[in-house]
Amino acid sequence: MSSKPVGTSNYAGVVDETKSHWGNLIAATAALSADGFDLVIMTYLLPFVQKEFGLDLGTASLLLLATTCTRWVGALLFGSLASRFGRKPILIAAVATCGVFTLLSGLSPNFATILIIRLLFGFGVGGVYATAGALIRESAAKRGGLFSGIMILGWFGGAALSPVFYYLFLPTWGWRGVFVTESAVLLLIPYLIFALKESEVWKAARAGIRASGAPGSAQAQGKKGRSFLAIFGRRFIGTTVLIAVLEYGNFFAQSSGSLLPTYLHNIHLSVGEIALIGSVSGFAAMPGSLLGGWLCDKLGRRRTFITLFCLLLVPVAVTFTVPNFAVILVSWICFGFVNGALGASLAVFETEQYPTDLRSPGYGFAHNFGALAGAFGTTFAAFLSATMGLSVALIGLTGLGVVLGIGSMFFFKETAGRSLLADDAVGIPLGEGRPDLEATVAGGPPTDG
């Protein structure tokens, strides 16, 4: 542990880029890659599940909605447990939850059963995001954007592998076999137990260390921390609402990807062509996530967000207005790159909005509650497609997401370079100054949430 006192620009007791932090980064990246794989493979398997159970597209798309309906609940549950018991054990528990319900998805005898299983799977997904995001952001003092970008790279890596897996194994194994094989994510658990190290920032907060180095911080009184309900309290409700709006915009803007395989199937592209488009887009998102994290550190969070949201609409409009394989391939590569950059930017920015004892449930809830909007948007677009066509519905939904994302940025303050110490959270109540921070700077005690 570093001898550097708490209250400097770095985290309490954290030395940037030690072996333990890189170990955390690799392990959390692997966990998110499994999540990305499962969430995206479901979009490719959807037409086959729909056919087996004799469903219309709108009803079948409820399987996509089911997971995101419970992600925010899982984020609050696992995030609160991570604040109390540590990031490491709860991240492992969340990964195990995902693996078990992935296996059960492939064994479902009917639509009602798989719908319930996908609901339960969502708890684990929310937990992985809540705990991994907090752990990695707390593992990097100076390169939070880069570390978060690498972590999100894992999600997109899993997403990129899913269409390859779909192409290679679906014809032989069927959609059930794909799910059963995918449950091999459970094999990650021994590695996570060995590789993950507990967050030093969390340890410091639990020990009740103030930013000044003295014990007994407000949020660590009694070494219990605040309830996750504090993110809905007076001090943090503005932050929570704004991040939810930002995530609504993000997921609306990228929801077209959920129905892209269905659209490509409808314009009679082959399984190989569909897999290629999805795969190269996913791989393009990986360098995009690195660039997004780097840009956040160099240009600032707000400027990066506004630029990326503007760029995202272009490839979506091209993809759904020009039904040509080559054009779609190029435009969706661009979409993947920008989407990767946006995902990394969100991960670093949102974890900077809450103090240590609320970081995991706060970030997890806001991100996954926003994902719920994207899922509703996907289902809504599927039903709208019957009257206005799938292309128009998806372009319109993306445009709405861009407006929400850019609009929310005007209420946020820049957080690049700000400390994430337990008593020095940035929280943004609708663009106003933070009385608690002003009191801390003036020498008074911070206001508890």
Image: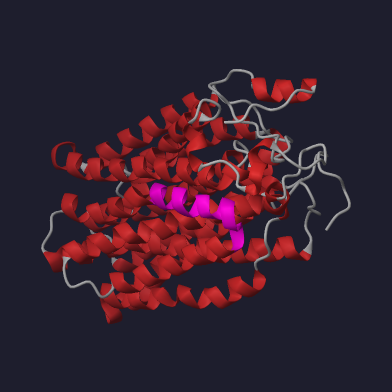
- Quadrant of the drawing holding the N terminus: bottom right
- Pick the residue in front: 121 or 85: 85
Q: Position of residue 167 (x, y in %)?
A: 35, 72
Q: Is residue 409 above or below residue 372?
A: above
- Pick the residue in front: 161 or 274: 161
Q: Is residue 277 above or below residue 242?
A: below
**Residue 159 falls in which quadrant of the image?**
bottom left
Q: Is residue 262 magenta?
A: no
Q: Position of residue 357 (x, y in %)?
A: 61, 44
Q: Which residues are magenta?
A: 71-88
Q: Decide if residue 267 is in sight here.
A: no
Q: Position of residue 380 (x, y in %)?
A: 23, 40
- Quadrant of the drawing holding the C terminus: top right
The overriding secondary structure of the stretch rendered in magenta is: helix
Residue at 72% x, 60% y: name it: 21
Q: Position of residue 347 (x, y in %)?
A: 57, 45
Q: Residue furthest left?
A: 54
